[in-house]
Amino acid sequence: MGRKFFTVSFDDGTEQDVRLVALMEKYGIRGTVNLSSGLFGQREEGVSRETTEALVDGTERRIRVCYDHNILPLEQAKELYSRDFIEIAGHGAHHMHQASLDREHLTDEIAGDAARLEEIFGRKVRGHVFPYGEYNEECLSVMEEAGLVYGRYVTSAGPEADFAFHAERGIIRPTCRMTDGFALPLLERFISAPCGDEDMVFYFWGHSFELDYGIDSASDAFLETLFRTAAEADGIEFVTNGELIDAAGIR
Ligand SMILES: [Zn+2]
């Protein structure tokens, strides 16, 4: 009999993670934060840019958003992410476009980053999420060399997601992301779907600074509703990304 897993993955480690982690704690959600070891304390206030919001039916619209991208200082990060329901993974030491780096630089961005995060947090780092979702064959080989066993695409499977566990060479395909307006109906379909022989996964990812976009699908109220809906459902196992990899047995 297959099992149902729920996991979250959040990138960049900005100050809004304080609100995210409080909601995870309140509802018993487990997950992974993807951090850059060389950027603690970096501040970028009032970032204004165009991005995309997915509507309930899966169509997209362009929106202009404004938010602060202030990465938590090291001491605050150590305190916040020390909770046992949080796993630490790498996100590139300096959040660079890795597909254009030479081998030496790439090794430092991926393997060096993981080693520094392990030293800072005193925990094993097993995953690496490519900044901007960009990678090539060399990135995968450096990951493998560093003993990092999983990564994640920056995609969404859309409103028709099938909840199967999709991963190619350890790179996980998420179910949906925080700016997806269909995330809640999708979760409700996940909850009510009968569990067959195969494991089912609801993999939710995002950035906590998206909570400040001022759109319905990415707000504190929305995230709380999503987490509460999952927490109140029967038969869901809450896991970090690393625990999902172990449970689903992929490599
Ligand atoms: Zn990032």
Image: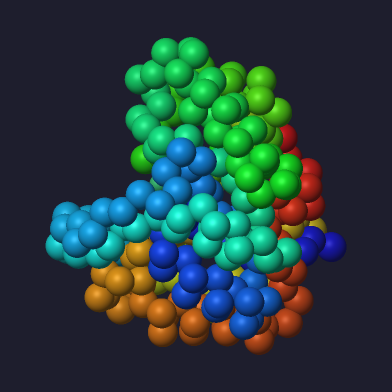
Percent coordinates x, y for residue 206 in the rendering: 43, 59
- The location of residue 165, given as percent across then percent down, is 64, 50
Against 197, is 183 above or below?
Answer: below
Left or right for 52, reference 18: left
Identify the residue at image location x=25%, y=75%: 214
In the image, what residue occupies the spot 39% across and 23% down? 99
| On screen, residue 113 above or below 211 | above
**Residue 151 in sight in this render:** no
Residue found at x 42% / y 13%: 102
Left or right for 84, reference 77 = right
Tally the numbered discs: 0
Q: Please state if 124 lies on the left or on the right of 10 as rendered.
A: right
State the quadrant of the N terminus. bottom right
Toward the viewer: 160 or 207?
207
Residue located 41% across and 64% down the image: 15
Which of 4/242 is in front? 242
Give the quadrant of the C terminus: top right
Figure colour scheme = rainbow
Provide residue 35's location: percent of width, then percent of height. 51, 47
